[in-house]
Image (spheres, grey):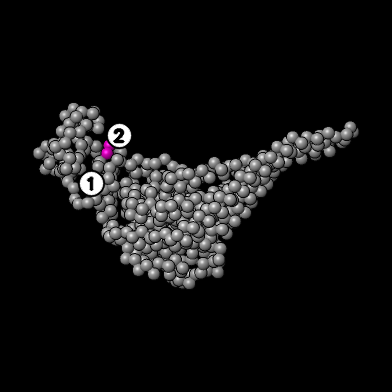
Amino acid sequence: MRPRRIEKRLLPSLRLSAMFCDPLRGQIAETKCVAERPFRPPAPFACRVLWFHSPSGDTFRDWWAIGAGAQMSVTIQCAACRRKLKIRDEQLGRRAKCPSCGEVITLAASDTAAASAAETVDDEPPLPELPGRQNVRTSAAALMKQVLGAFDGEFQRPRVSISYLLAMLFVAAASAVLVLTYLALVALVAYGVYWHAVHNVTWFSLPPGTPGRVRAFIAVGYVLLLVLGGVMVLFLLKPLVARSSRAKLGRRLELSDEPIVHSFVAKLAEVVGAPEPAEIRVNSSVNAGAFMGSGLFSLFSRRLVLVIGTPLVAGLDARQFAGVIAHELGHFSQGLGSRVSGFIVAIQNWLAMGAYGGDEWDEWFSDLTDEDFAPLVLLGATCQFGAFLVRLVFYVLLILSVLASFLLMRQMEYDADRYEALVVGEETFVKTTRRLLQLTVAEAMARAMLVNRDAPEPAEGHFAGLVLHVSKQMPKSVRDELREHSETSRTSWFSTHPSDADRIRNIERLEAPGIFHLDLPARKLFLHFDRVAAETSPKAFKRMFPQSAE
């Protein structure tokens, strides 16, 4: 992740002081999720599947030959079921089974089909045309070929030094000690609840003649201590297996809906040597993140999840967007170093979830305190206090983890920056760094407008469009101030992320030209960007502009 802190002293007129670090809230590290792996065709990377849905609901596949050299396709027809199939010319003469009826057919094209080999032919009606595109499938195939063909050159993966790896192992050991401390604390609190329940029953052994109010007070105290201890045990155990809400992480981006984005991300993962993301999600933050699993058991997960913010896509070009994704994937492309750093990040993410992660339980406790019945109010307040104590424990453990690893975390960010610069070049890296700061401020201003209900309705009809509009209308004085901040900011002593100025200075030494060259808005990589952005717009935007949400 690439957090952006906007201080009051930087923009006093905006009255901002916010940290935007992850897709959920201003947490210190990414929150994780576990996801099912989307469909991937058993074919080389150069051949990707585009899925389309006809109005009748049937699903059929078109195989687009994308990659090394231009490949012609021809159309054949199954004699049994009369289904038309498109194959590559190099498959002619072979025998195969029809995917519909299973009939063995010889892959030989008719004269008519061969004459129209380059055309897309099927029995289904064509997809509706989009502005500027004659045919969605033809344009998608051409665009995918253009995008994947924009990678030119050999990627030289940065090496990991022995000292860096030893530092990782030290921090990983410290993180493991924190986990053991947590488990010991859970056992201690659970035993304390048991001891209270068994041994403090003697509280009820009162001498005859004890006033009823005293007996009631002792009974209430005994029960409240049980409730307090039980709530603490539950809240201590919950982060052990809890999973972040996928709805908070955003909408899942299916391969069938956005094949170009999936192929683009897969190609980037292949280039930088990272595992291909098992799932891509989009939300309404000016950010992107990659992480594995959810909860403490995510330490054993190898399923990578990528989260992309739609305002990020709307505000960047394809090269800048590629750099951001390469940065996130770069965290997972160092072999043993990736596993060790992944362990450290997973521990910190898990601790952050325990310290900051509110859920429906907190809402239920809050509702109890709003009741008119005094015992329910007392019960809700006790539960809230127990949850607060547990979050305080997680917060202390998180601070200890950050203190043990902040230097290493900065170095991990520097390494991910090198992956970004080697993919898109030093110049694009600098532009992206400054642009992200502008978009982060624009997002904060847009959300403030939604709270104040004075936001202008964007022509695009979604929150990403509003952020882009605010960014374009940003006064030049503010832009200059942000640029100066990028050039002069310093990394604070305990910061886990370097300042923009330090990032830029670190990359200037590489003199990297980049291997990805494509002059195209990042939103063009999406076939249905406006629809995706509208679906992921925050609730405040949908309430203010309900006609846009429709």
The amino acid pointed to by label 1 is: Ala
Asked if residue 58 lies in the magenta stretch, the reply is: yes
Q: Which residue is drawn at 52% across and 45% down?
A: 295
User: In percent of the image, x 27 and y 39: which residue is there?
Assistant: 61
Front position among marks 1 and 2: 1
Circles 1 and 2: CB atoms closer than 8 Å: no
Q: Name the residue under label 1.
A: 65
* The residue stretch that appears in magenta: 56-61
Q: Can residue 42 be seen in this view?
A: yes
Location of residue 133 with respect to 360 vertically, above or below: below
Q: Is residue 125 magenta?
A: no
Q: What element carries label 2?
A: loop
Q: Residue 433 appears at what percent x and percent y?
A: 42, 64
Q: Position of residue 350 (x, y in %)?
A: 54, 48
Q: Position of residue 232 (x, y in %)?
A: 65, 43
What residue sits 74% from the left and 38% below the top?
196
Task: Give the residue at x 16% y 29%.
Answer: 79
